[in-house]
Amino acid sequence: MPAQPSLTLQRRINAKPAKIYAAWTEPSQIVKWMHPNNNDVIHAEMDVRVGGRFRIIMRTPEGEEHDVSGVFQEVVPDEKLVYTWAWRSTPERESLVTFMLRGEHGGERTLLTLKHEQFADEAARDDHEGGWNHVLDELSRQFA
């Protein structure tokens, strides 16, 4: 059986890992910058601990809502998160996200690596790749 599709994206961001971690895990910050494909986050909840859940609801410019949630499997503050990822519309297509931060230049800059794996198919991977690239660009702009 062929391996399930995955993607890995990286960004260097002009902020300390702790600031990026907070932006990624605090609902009040997520709503400010997470706008994949011009969607708005209208609801975000995060229980950032192993076994804790997250949920994010996004609304498209046309008013359609998309609801994604998952469970944190690994939590290393300011360094790493591993969590499941499933859309409410397709809960059987659960995938896995690994978010890693590594300080550079004395900790003033951060290399962010996002790996999303176990996609059901290449189309799902390609859809997510566009959304994640947009999200990471928005996050980078927050700290530009």
Image (cartoon, rainbow, N blue to C red):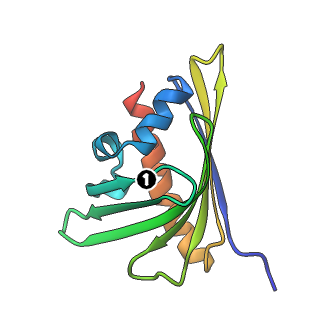
> Residue 28 location, x and y as percent?
29, 42
Q: Which residue is mark 1?
A: 47
Q: Give residue 2's quadrant in the image.
A: bottom right
> Residue 84 location, x and y as percent?
56, 65
Q: In percent of the image, x 65 and y 59: which residue is there?
A: 7
Does residue 121 lie above or below 27 as drawn? below
Does residue 41 lie above or below 32 as drawn? below
Label 1 Cα crowd, 10 Å radius (few <14 / some 14-19 / many 20+): some
- Front residue of this view, candidates 119 and 94: 94
Does residue 27 lie above or below 20 as drawn? below
On screen, residue 58 versus residue 4, left or right, reads: left
* Image quadrant where one finds the N terminus: bottom right
Q: In percent of the image, x 55 and y 60: which residue is there?
A: 51
Q: Give residue 119's quadrant in the image.
A: bottom right
Q: Give residue 126's quadrant in the image.
A: bottom right
On screen, residue 2 versus residue 118, left or right, reads: right
On screen, residue 52 versus residue 40, left or right, reads: right
> Residue 111 location, x and y as percent?
63, 32
Amino acid carrying mark 1 in the image? Asp
